[in-house]
């Protein structure tokens, strides 16, 4: 049997699988919905591309990195009959905790462990193998896959039972985009007052209001107008929705993150799902009637 398979060679999956191939080479089976990405991966990274998804069932550990739990579940329906007992599926999708728990239960009845393993660090971190991985699930299975996950992640945390990785990831991402919107609102007000946003950022980044967004995302992707971080607004909105449902269930009195969720919905309406998530700032600029640069 082959060691590892990777399904879903998108902005994240392609470089993550690239780092797996550096160690396991041809023993890595790669599958992608549009097959040409898999053949490109095989020639660029020395992996083995497969055309039929059932072929990935030869692997002991199957990684997945798809847009959402919906595509993940569809895919599980396609491969479940071919799964060999003892297989571990490691889902790097930023998924929905409740769906993950339900799918995990069904898979366990077939002798397959499902671990959620969402990651943070973006396409750059995926390429540099410096991602943070948040693993949820059976401790024994987590131990078994950790050396493989370590091929693309620098920090690996076993966060709890299956589904908890996906829950933390959703909260992480709503914080990410909320920090971006918070800083942008403040900077837009300063701009209208006549303060240079670049000067304001330089100051804030040496003061207590700074965040990853003020230190990296706004200078690198917004002030340059490149809006090219590599994470789609629609995918961010999906994560914000997951966090919103979590808040609705466990802390419906929360105010700030719910407001952020509303702003995100408006941004997707005006900017579309396929633009970079940093374009959420464009929606705020339109509201303010000015641009940061
Ligand atoms: P992309 O849109 O770049 O890639 C999506 C991948 O899923 C592609 O391989 C695509 O195949 C495949 N896919 C889409 N629909 C289906 C389907 N119905 N059946 C089978 N395969 C399908 O997304 P990302 O790589 O950016 O994101 C993947 C996951 O990682 C998401 O959950 C995202 O939220 C998360 N994430 C993203 C980060 C980022 O910075 N980009 C950072 C951390 C997590 P095809 O090539 O054929 O379209």
Image: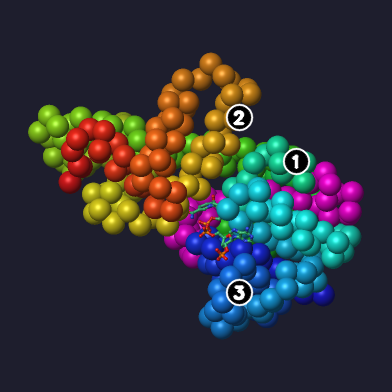
Q: Is residue 262 left or right of residue 100?
A: left
Q: Residue furthest left?
A: 194
Q: Which residue is mark 1?
A: 101
Q: Is residue 199 visible?
A: yes
Where residue 246 is drawn, which disc sits there?
2
Determine contact: label 3, label 2, CB under 8 Å: no
Q: Is residue 210 visible?
A: no
Q: Percent position (x, y) of residue 284?
A: 29, 36
Tell me what residue is drawn at x 31 percent, y 39 percent: 283
> Marks 3 and 2, how far apart in space?
36 Å
Determine contact: label 3, label 1, CB under 8 Å: no
The answer to if 117 sits in the magenta stretch is: yes
Mark 2 or mark 1, earlier in chain: 1
Q: Is residue 126 above or below residue 160?
A: below
Q: Percent position (x, y) of residue 159?
A: 66, 41
Q: Which residue is mark 3?
A: 35
Q: Is residue 4 above or below residue 179?
A: below
> Marks 3 and 1, how far apart in space?
30 Å
Q: Which residues are magenta?
A: 104-132
């Amino acid at each position: 049997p082959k060691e590892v398979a990777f399904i879903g060679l998108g902005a994240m999956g392609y470089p993550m699988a690239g780092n797996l191939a550096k160690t396991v080479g041809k023993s890595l089976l790669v599958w992608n919905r549009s097959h040409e990405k898999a053949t490109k991966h095989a020639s660029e990274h020395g992996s083995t591309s497969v055309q039929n998804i059932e072929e990935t069932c030869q692997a002991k550990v199957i990684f997945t990195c798809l847009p959402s739990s919906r595509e993940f579940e569809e895919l599980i329906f396609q491969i479940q009959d071919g799964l060999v007992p003892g297989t571990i599926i490691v889902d790097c999708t930023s998924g929905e905790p409740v769906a993950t728990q339900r799918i995990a239960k069904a898979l366990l009845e077939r002798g397959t462990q499902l671990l959620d393993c969402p990651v943070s660090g973006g396409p750059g971190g995926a390429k540099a193998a410096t991602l943070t991985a948040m693993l949820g699930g059976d401790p024994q299975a987590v131990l078994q896959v950790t050396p493989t996950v370590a091929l693309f992640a620098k920090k690996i945390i076993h966060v709890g039972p299956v589904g908890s990785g996906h829950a933390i990831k959703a909260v992480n991402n709503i914080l990410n985009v909320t920090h971006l919107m918070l800083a942008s609102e403040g900077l837009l007000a300063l701009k209208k007052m006549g303060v240079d946003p670049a000067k304001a950022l330089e100051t804030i980044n040496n003061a207590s209001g700074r965040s990853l967004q003020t230190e990296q995302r706004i200078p690198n992707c917004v002030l340059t107008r490149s809006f090219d971080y590599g994470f789609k607004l629609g995918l961010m909105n999906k994560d914000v929705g997951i966090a919103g449902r979590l808040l609705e269930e466990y802390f419906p009195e929360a105010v700030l993150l719910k407001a952020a969720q509303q702003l995100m919905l408006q941004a997707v309406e005006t900017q579309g799902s396929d633009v970079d998530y940093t374009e959420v700032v464009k929606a705020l600029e339109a509201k303010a009637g000015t641009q940061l640069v």
